[in-house]
Amino acid sequence: MNILFVCLGNICRSSTAECVFRSTIEKAGLANRITMDSAGTAGYHVGEPSDSRSIQVAAKRGYDMNSIRARQVVLEDYSRFDLLLAMDNSNLKTLQEQCPEKYQEKIKLFLDYGKTCEEREVPDPYYGGPSGFDHVLNLIEDASAGLLAELQSPA
């Protein structure tokens, strides 16, 4: 199983999701069966590390985001990944518009896997304060647990 987490610039939400889900599957003993990456629909930050606020908030909960570098979604991602999980409706729409028809069913909203949150979109914390990054991490941890449960359930 190959999973791609997607937001706009790939420095806050999707990179956090990649890091948290990687930790989630490692703890579940599935690191050899599930691979993941993250990307942005825009190329604003290609090659840059994640936002320092994302890194700091994640580190407080034991996640290490230091090795992640931003990249932009490319056409090959639609065939390479089994799931492309958008952080919000805007990026969902962009993915759907760019995606070849035969791969459309792979595109979903990440928070559709959330079990306790009522939100459908992971809000962009970039222009907010530290509490926004904590909130994003809460949502991502919830959806990561739900995604893991979905992947572990019998087909």
Image (cartoon, rainbow, N blue to C red):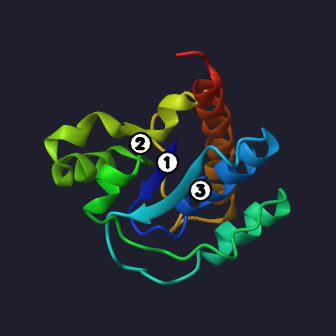
Task: Find residue 129 and report its image quarter.
Answer: bottom right
Is 13 situated above or below 139?
below
Q: Is residue 58 above or below residue 86?
A: below
From the image, tell me which residue sits under label 1.
2
Q: Which residue sits at x=67%, y=71%?
A: 53
Looking at the picture, does residue 119 appear above or below residue 127?
above
Measured Cα–Cα span from mark 1 to mark 3: 11 Å
| Dot 1 and dot 2 residues touching (CB under 8 Å) | yes
Could you tell me if residue 116 is visible in this image? no
The answer to whether residue 101 is visible is yes
Q: Residue 146 shows which numbered tag? A: none
The mark nearer the N terminus, 2 or 3, is 3
Residue 105: x %, y % from top left: 29, 33
Q: Residue at x 64, y 39 (%)?
A: 144
Discs 2/3, front: 2
Task: Specify the quadrant of the image occupied by residue 76.
Answer: bottom left
Of residues 84 and 109, the one nearer the viewer is 84
Residue beneath disc 2: 82
Q: Nearer the viewer, residue 55 or 72?
A: 72
Identity of the amino acid at label 1?
Asn
- Amino acid type of disc 2? Asp
- Few, some or many residues within 10 Å of mark 1 (<14, 14–19, 20+): some
As helix, strand or loop, the secondary structure at mark 3 comes to helix
Relative side of 134 to 70, left or right = right
Residue 39 lies, in percent from the top left, at 43, 64
